[in-house]
Image (cartoon, rainbow, N blue to C red):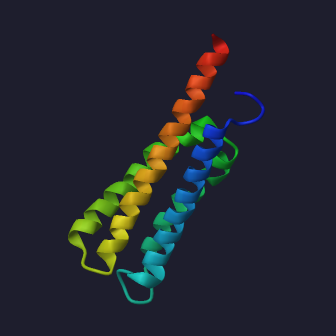
Amino acid sequence: MPNTPTTAVKITRAVALVSLAALIALCVGWELWWAPIRPGGSWLVLKALPLLFPIAGIARLRMYTYRWTSLLVWLYFAEGLVRATSDRPPSSPLAWVEVVLSLVLFAACAAHVRVRQKQAAAAHA
């Protein structure tokens, strides 16, 4: 990869970072204030902790981080889908937001990896 990232790389990184930050905020807000399982919050807020680990790697354009984040996000997608179809409001709309944010984060990570692989192949050829 060249020293300066291309526009496509910058866009996919920005979308990944924004959707990751939004997913973290959603997980924390959901379990502490908006619709916790127990009044006053629950330990389920700790589900946001694994999402903190990829922030630095995504910001620094580390391919490995994009790859494992694209796998990690499916856990949040699955949880969101289960809770969207089984919980009652106000939890179910928050779960649908989690599903959408998970899909956006996955798409951004997958697009980023694809763009970078094409660049590497072009540079190698």
Residue 59 falls left or right of residue 74: right
Query: Which quadrant of the view contains residue 5?
Result: top right
Establish if 108 lies above or below 87. Answer: above
Furthest toward the left, the residue is 86
* The residue positioned farthest toward the front in the image shown: 7
Asked if residue 19 lies left or right of residue 74, the reply is right
Identity of the residue drawn at 51% across and 45% down: 108
From the viewer's side, name the closer residue of 49 and 99. 99
* Residue at horizontal 66 percent and vertical 39 percent from the top: 7
In the image, residue 65 lies at what x, y percent?
58, 42
Q: Quadrant of residue 79?
A: bottom left
The residue depicted at 36 percent of the width and 85 percent of the height is 38
Where residue 1 sits, quadrant-wise, is top right
* Residue 45 visible somewhere in the drawing: yes
Q: Residue 125, how many percent across, how many down?
A: 63, 10
Q: Residue furthest right?
A: 3
Residue 81 is situated, as x and y percent measured from the top left of the image, at 29, 60
Residue 67 appears in the rendering: no
| In this picture, residue 58 sits left or right of residue 51 | right
Residue at the (44%, 44%) spot, across then down: 71
- In the image, residue 4 sits, relative to residue 43, either above or below, namely above
Most foreground residue, 39 or 87: 87
Percent across and percent down for residue 104 are: 45, 52
Above or below — where is 122 with respect to 34? above
Which residue is situated farthest in the bottom direction here? 39
Count of marks, rendered view: 0
